[in-house]
Amino acid sequence: MSAAPLTGLVIAAHGRHYLADVDGKKIQCVTRGKKTNIAVGDVVNLAMTSGDQAVIESIAERKTLLYRSDQYKSKLLAANLTRLFIVVATEPGFADDLISRSLVAAEAAGIEAHLILNKTDVTDLLPKARERLLTYTSLGYPLHEVSARAAPEHAVATLMPLLEGQSSIFIGQSGMGKSSLINLLVPDADIAVREISAALDTGKHTTTFTRLYHLGQDATIIDSPGFQEFGLYHLSEGMIERAFVEFTPYLGGCKFYNCRHLIEPQCAILAALEAGKIARFRHTLYGQLLHESAQTLY
């Protein structure tokens, strides 16, 4: 057997088990030792150990990396992304905290962020949902309105052009219809999930792993498990400050060069907050993120 190194694209991860696509063939992979620093979307160099199994020798340089973290550990979500889509819906209610944290994570990682509002057929709840999302659209984040259930063709026509040529990830809370949208965009998604489950030996019905699908030649879409929290303990104060896009016009305008924009006198950010130019809940989250940043133990 040839010892020439193979290059693969990681298409699924579950614990320390990974699945890589090597020229259309799915290869089961493990890391050497206890390393778990591999993400779906990583391009990896492999050493084959049998016909369909390999060891990951190295990771190609990443363009971007999206991850979340708590006080003790971090969890890689995906690598080499160009676009992040946050899926919300008219019902059940969505959490502004999770949206804002996802946007901060995207900004810090250099990934373009979009919002998708699903279930627009629930017309009585639509105005309220739009009103809540104004906070984000006014900051320049694009919003795309769809109904996976009531208008599937329109949903595909709306989203497919945004995915072409991109490496995208869909994230959101459970119940927002994220999986329904993925199934519309990737007609064989459920078959692929069964294949991946079998290859990773994770059981038939698991949705706890992140997975990547190919959309044509030059586009990929990653589906991540629904989650309720998005910890950002790994971000530094400077990264957090720059990830709030509404702060940008005021940065550098404070009296003190090391201003933290919390209680300092003559702070340009606090002045903008009082003038209603910055949403109070976003500034409150900024303060929480600074606090988290100071707690990190790893």
Image (cartoon, grey):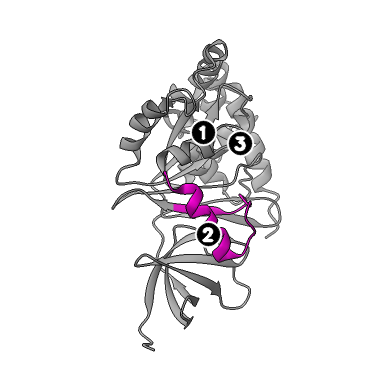
Looking at the rendered structure, the secondary structure element under dot 3 is loop
Q: Quadrant of the N terminus?
A: bottom left
Which residue matches tag 3?
Answer: 173
Mark 3 or 2, closer to the camera: 2
Amino acid carrying mark 2 in the image: Ile
Please indicate whether residue 212 sits to the left or right of residue 215 in the image: right
Please, what is the three-letter code of the amino acid marked with disc 1? Val
Q: Looking at the image, is mark 1 or mark 2 earlier in the sequence?
A: 1
- Horizontal side of residue 137 vs 125, given as left or right: left
Q: Nearer the viewer, residue 106 or 203?
A: 203
N-term-proximal mark, 3 vs 2: 3
The residues tagged by marks 1 and 3 sit, at their Cα atoms, a distance apart of 8 Å
Q: Which residue is mark 1?
A: 87
Measured Cα–Cα span from mark 3 to mark 2 = 23 Å
Q: Amino acid at mark 3?
A: Gln
| Label 1–label 3 contact, CB within 8 A | no
Which residue is under mark 2?
A: 196
Dot 2: what SS?
Answer: helix
Number of the front mark, 1 or 2: 2
Q: Position of residue 141 (x, y in %)?
A: 42, 29
* Residue at image coords 51%, 36%: 180
Q: Does the magenta portion include 206?
A: yes
Residue 91's spot in the image, x, y percent? 60, 23
Q: At 43% from the left edge and 53% from the top edge, which residue is drawn?
A: 64
Where does residue 183 sit, x and y in percent of width and height? Answer: 47, 41
Residue 136 vs 72, above or below: the answer is: above
- Residue at 49% of width from left, 52% of height from top? 191
Q: Is residue 257 visible?
A: no
In the image, the segment drawn in magenta is: 187-212
